Amino acid sequence: MAERGRPRSFDRGEALRHAMMLFWEKGFQSTSMSELTAAMGINAPSLYAAFGSKDALYREAMALYEEGDGVELGRQIADAPSAKAAVEAYLMRSAALFTRPGKPAGCMVVLSVIHGAGTSPQTCTALRDARAEAQAMIEARLRRAVEASELPAASDLAAIASFYVTVQQGMSIRARDGATRPELEAIARAAMSAWDGLTQARS
């Protein structure tokens, strides 16, 4: 017989993955503790013992998401042969990731603008930093393109990055509303048609 009061043994990583999926689908405030414990296969005392709080669990779930989709999108940006190809790969791969069968639609990081309501100031800051990371990565890739004379030195890199990040964030919302992968890819192609105008030399 198990000793009374002994913590239930469970796979922490697997429990966190289930929490991530639930938060991704429903958001922080709309996810109840009873739903979390049921999805994670643990009781409330075990959840608090392992993760500290619901808020801390949400931060860990977001970090886990970034280790997957976030890293993949970052790789698309870093490994592309040109800045234009990097941005196109970022948008097209986003269209695929946002519409995968068996996963919640959209991007968990983007959806945290809405789904992060009710979190602590510390978590709000972490979410803002996560949302800003994509722009920073694209700006860094554009800066490499300027250094390689691929883009004019006078290019407004922040504006270009902001435009494409905003498009990608809109694609996430559209995916959550039911847009299909081909529909999102059409948005991505339309956005890429603006590339020449955005990157031309400024007088």
Image (spheres, rainbow, N blue to C red):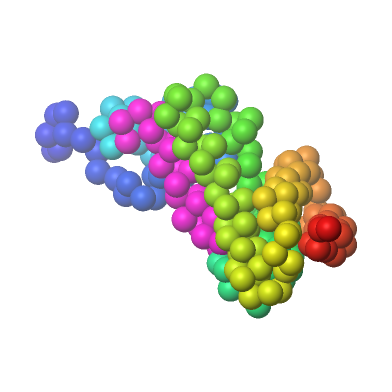
In depth, the one of 112 and 1 nearer the eye is: 112
Name the outermost residue toward the front. 203
Q: Would residue 186 appear left or right of 176 to someone viewing this image?
A: right
* Residue 152 higher or lower than 104, as above or below: below
Q: Position of residue 146 (x, y in %)?
A: 66, 68
Residue 111 percent across, percent down from the top left: 63, 38
Position of 169 with respect to 131 (left or right) is: right
Report if residue 25 lies within the magenta region. Answer: no
Q: Which part of the image, by quadrant, shows the N terminus? A: top left
Q: Tell me if I can see residue 119 in this picture.
A: yes
The picture quadrant where one finds residue 36 is top left
**Which residue is found at the position 74% from the left and 67% from the top?**
152
Q: Quadrant of the C terminus?
A: bottom right
Q: Is residue 103 above or below residue 186?
A: above
Instruction: Identify which residue, 105 or 190, lies in the foreground.
Output: 190
Q: Which residues are magenta?
A: 51-74
Give the residue at x 43% y 38%.
59
Q: Position of residue 117 (x, y in %)?
A: 57, 25
Who's the residue at 24% across and 38% down the image? Answer: 8
Q: Is residue 60 magenta?
A: yes
